[in-house]
Image (cartoon, rainbow, N blue to C red):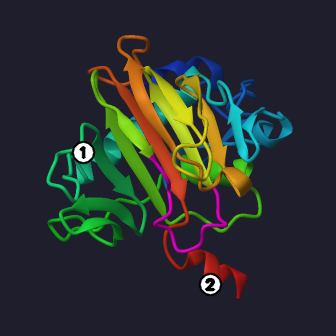
Amino acid sequence: MGAADPLWPPWPDPLVASLGRDGPPRRFEGDIGTRFWRCKRRERRVLSGFEALPARPGREVRPGARLWAAALDAGAQAALMAAVEAIWAEAPPRHPVTRWGKPMSVGMSAAGPLGWTSDRRGYRYAPAQEDGRAWPPIPPMLLDLWAAAVPGAAPPDSCLVNLYRDRARMGLHQDRDEADLTQPVVSVSLGDEALFRIGGAERGAPTQSLWLRSGDVLVLEGPARLAFHGIDRIRAGSSAVVPGGGRVNLTLRVAGATAAASAS
């Protein structure tokens, strides 16, 4: 493997110094655990392990809502951002309208068998984009994170990819369009800091706010699974992870019949 090898490096530059150019990469010490590679037919790929995530207790924001601050280090954030850009190449972010005909301020895309969409008919999951193309697959790195954060949960079949630019926000809402509401939601933040607000299962219940930062992982399950939550604002310019600025939020969930099938 030399400088002329077009497949090198298979990961973003921040990881090269830690992984080494020749032979098996050295152990990479970081919050996301160990990394390893494999070579098969000249395909080289870094698999990110998240073994350290469940070992760290995280912070209980409220019952059922747990935050792992800085779960992804700088190298993992860069790798995940590259995966997001690959998703956007196949499913560009768009601003869907609400059922009242108002465009959303958040740019939305998705990955996995099901993507989330909205129009005047309402909110729903759909197996294809508006042009009929399938959604791109969920990046393996996110599947690893899901398995580490919520072991025992059914595999996710949808990953919403939301892009918040300077003035974008998300009003208080519940994630309740999924087939099995006992399955968790796992959220990953990249880029600018965001003021996240969470309340109870009833609209109008008291809320609390906290800043989510790039690399944070938040899980909503159990009593917090149907908690109202939203993004009040982002702190523009607080991170350089997202090209062009802003925040990317990836939320993994079990949207369709996957959970029922795995339980049978």
Q: Amino acid at mark 1?
A: Pro
**In-image side of 15 versus 137 (left or right):** right
Q: Secondary structure at mark 1?
A: loop
Label disc, if present, on residue 93 of the rendered structure: 1
- 177 vs 129, nearest the viewer: 177
Q: Amino acid at mark 2?
A: Ala
Mark 1 surroundings within 10 Å by alpha-carbon count, few (fewer than 14), some (14 through 19), many (20 or more): some
Disc 2 or 1, which lies upstream in sequence? Answer: 1
Mark 2 surroundings within 10 Å by alpha-carbon count, few (fewer than 14), some (14 through 19), many (20 or more): few
* Percent position of residue 186, x then y: 59, 48
Main secondary structure along the magenta-highlighted residues: loop
Q: Secondary structure at mark 2?
A: helix
Q: Magenta stretch?
A: 173-184
* Percent position of residue 53, x then y: 76, 38
Label count reads 2
Q: Which of the image's four quarters has the C terminus?
A: bottom right
Toward the top, the furthest residue is 237
